[in-house]
Each structure stands twice: as C-alpha cells, then as structure tokens.
Amino acid sequence: MLLIQNGRIVDPVTGTDAILDVLIDDNRIVKVAEKISPDMISGDVGVIDASGLVVAPGLVDTHVHFRDPGFTYKEDILTGAEAAARGGFTTVVCMANTKPAVDNPETLSYIQEKAKQAKIRVLQTATVSKGLKGQELVDMDGLAGLGAVGFTDDGIPVMDEQLLTTAMEKARELGVPISLHEEDPAFVYQAGVNQGAVSEKLKYGGASHTAEDVMVARDCMIALATRASVCIQHISSAYSVEMVRLAKRLGADVHAEATPHHFTLTEDAVLQYGTNARMNPPVRTEADRQKIIEGLQDGTIDMIVTDHAPHSEEEKARPLADAPSGITGLETSLALGIHSLVKPGYLTLMQLLTCMSKNPAEFYHLTPGSVVEGAAADLVIFGQYEKWTVRKEEFASKASNSPFIGWELPGRIHYTIYQGKIVYQG
C-alpha cells in the first residue's frame, strides 16, 4: 500500500481542488479522504508527504516519437517511456512514422510486445497510407483490430483528398480518431523556419503559414462531411486556429493540439537556439503565439502534446538547411505549461491539466485518469511553482535537442506513479 498525505488534489474529471489524502492498494486508488493515518491501515504502507504539492492524474501525451523500430540511436520505446515518466506522463501515444512504418501487423506487434516492458502505458497508432506514401490506404480494419488506437501519417501531409475522405469514413466506422499533419509542400520553401522576418534575415526560404492554413481549411470541411473524429496536429498558425473554431461551431468533430514550443517560443528563437528551434511546423510570430493561447483559453485547442522528437547531437549540429526538425519535449512539457500559461494567468492549473490528461485520453477513447476511489493509481505529484533548471545531463531521453536547456522553470516533478508503483522519483 501507498499513502499520499496532505496533497492538493487537482482533478479535471471531477473538478476537485482540495487538500486530501489518497490511499493506493495494488494498482487502484482505494480511499480518498480528508485524513487517512497509517495507524488506520492494516499491513505495511509507504507514506509520501505531499504537503505543498499538487497530486493530479497522470499526464497523457498523444503525440510522441519513440523512433522504434528503425531509429533507436535517437530513442527507443524504453528510454522514451523513462523520459515520459520523468515528465509526469503515465500514458503516451506513439506516432507511426518509424522504419518500417507501422502499416503492417508485424511492426505493430513488435512495438506492442516491447511496450509491455515499459515503465508506463505506451500505445501505438498506425499509418493512414502504406509506406507513408499517400497513395494506398492501409488495412485499417485489421490494424485497428490488432490494437492500433488511431491513424496518422504524422510528419507527412495526406495530399490526396479522395484517399483522406475514405480514411475518415473508415475511421468513423471503426470508432477511432485520425490525426493530420498539415503542411502543403507547395508553400514550404525550406522547412523548419517560419517564412517571415527571421527567414529573410537568415536568407532561408522558410515555411509559410499558408502551408498549414490551406490544409486545415480543407480537412476541417472533410471532417464535417464525414463526421470523423479528427485532430489537427501541432497547430502553429493564427488563421488555422480560427478555422478549427469555425469547424467546431459548424458541428465538426474536430480537435486541435498545441505544443509547449508553439505557445512559448516565436520565430526569433531560431536566431538564439539555431537548429534546436527548427521544427515542422515552425514556431511563428508573437501574434500566432497569442492566438494559440486564445484557442487554449476557449477550448478551440483542446489538447497539449509534446510532439517529442528526439534527434542525435550529430544530426542537430548540421547546418540549418540540413538538420532534422523537432525537439524533445516530454521532460519539460508540464513545466512550460505552468511557465507560459498558468503563471501569466492565461489558464488555471485545472484547465492546463484538462488539456494534458483528460482531453487527450478522451480523444483516444481512453478512460481519463481521476483521483477517486476505484480509479487506476496513475498519478503525478509536483510542486506547482517549485523551480528547477533544465539540464542536458539529467534528461532520461537519449536525446537532448531542446532549446530549453538552461532555463529555470516552475513545476518540479517529485513522483510519477503508474499502476500504483513509483516509476519516477525526483
């Protein structure tokens, strides 16, 4: 048994925000009360004094890249799970652009078997198209039947409207979501940097916000027509936020993700952090950043995800035009949410946790975590404004390609608990 005493329970499922004790037996929460003392419990019990700390449902990240199979020098399922646990996550959903891609039962089965050894719950999507080529649909029935929790060609846009419409119709029939990377290559002159003042300064072609906007507009309307449950991934453009808002108002089952880097940084970060601020879609202007925050405030954007994208130091050391896009994100996500959204007063802590646990779980038809009797004992315990410094050598991930190294951030994580076991203690 494990007893957590005096913690501030913040539960977005029940709306609870109160100082309570929590008793865990095996993998379940068995009692939540104002006072539970160890002498009230028969048998051995470990005690965590959570005085001054927040106790919340474990975080859920529905957009990570664990690079396994094919690129395990960057990350693998087990190291990715370690990084997730260190970041307070108890469930993650992996994208399908591995090598080979998750477009077949064998690759899906390999990942699922290896995931059984992970510290946390690791779920897997499958691709929309075979080989991520955008030409032929995968066997969506078969892959969903084997446990793929959704479909995405993340990293590559699905350009064929007919193929995408068929995929959305099938996803709706199967009752699984479909998630879309929205960048039309016609408007991407050089990837990873916003086309604007910074790209001009660097004499770098850049990626226009139009690349995202035209795809989001198209796909929101296809979602409306097919009634599929669709996610606009890692939204970066102010205009795209407005289109998602319109689609929701029209009745489409459209959702949107924001990443911590898109609501924290602007295009100027490329000048300071170089390739560690290169990402697809790129971080854009302050006006875009503010519109993303507005989208989070009114629920237009309902999920915060990391797009955890580990790369080796050698790869990120290449010139800007040749380096891969993406940053690691699992170990800094909660802290950046508090730093960029809660501390300035844009969101309450409850709203932040809704976007980081309840809503992502519900999008993937998972039971959202809750701090109630009978619920799974998947929890994160953290100091909301307790400062810590992001240090490269302390990352659990194999990679450290982050612009946030050296930043002092709030939200130090003390414990991550999965199925009643402490999987991270810091």
Image (tube, grey):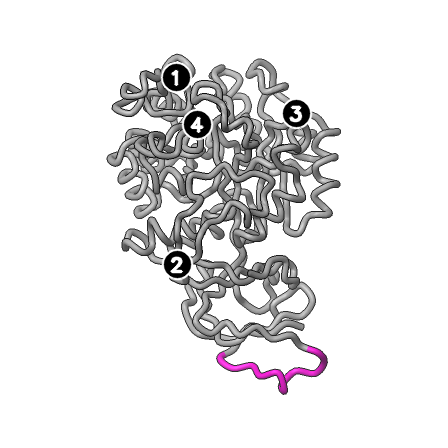
Q: Say what secondary structure mark 4 lies in.
A: loop
Which element is circle 3 on?
loop
Residue displayed at 28% across by 38% down: 291
Is mark 3 in CB contact (under 8 Å) with mark 4?
A: no
The residue that mark 4 highlights is 280
User: Can you give x and y, in whole percent of width and height, for residue 351 in the image?
Assistant: 37, 54
Near-viewer residue (351 or 363)? 351
Identify residue for label 1. Answer: 188
User: Closer to the N terminus: mark 2 or mark 4?
Assistant: 4
**Residue type (three-letter) at the residue carrying disc 2:** Met
CB within 8 Å, label 4 to label 1:
no
Which label was assigned to residue 99? 3
> Label 4 neighbourhood size at 10 Å, few (<14), some (14-19), many (20+)?
many
Q: Earlier in the sequence, mark 4 or mark 1?
A: 1
The three-letter amino acid code for the residue at tag 4 is Asn
Labelled pair 2, 4 in contact (Cβ < 8 Å) = no
Is residue 301 magenta-colored? Answer: no
Q: Disc 2 or disc 4, which is closer to the eye? A: 4
Foreground tag (2 vs 1): 1
- Toward the viewer: 264 or 44? 264
Cα distance, mark 1 to mark 3? 24 Å
Residue pictured at 60% horizontal, 68% vertical: 29
Magenta-colored span: 34-44
Q: Where residue 188 sits: x, y (%)?
A: 39, 17
Per the picture, the main secondary structure of the magenta-coloured stretch is: loop
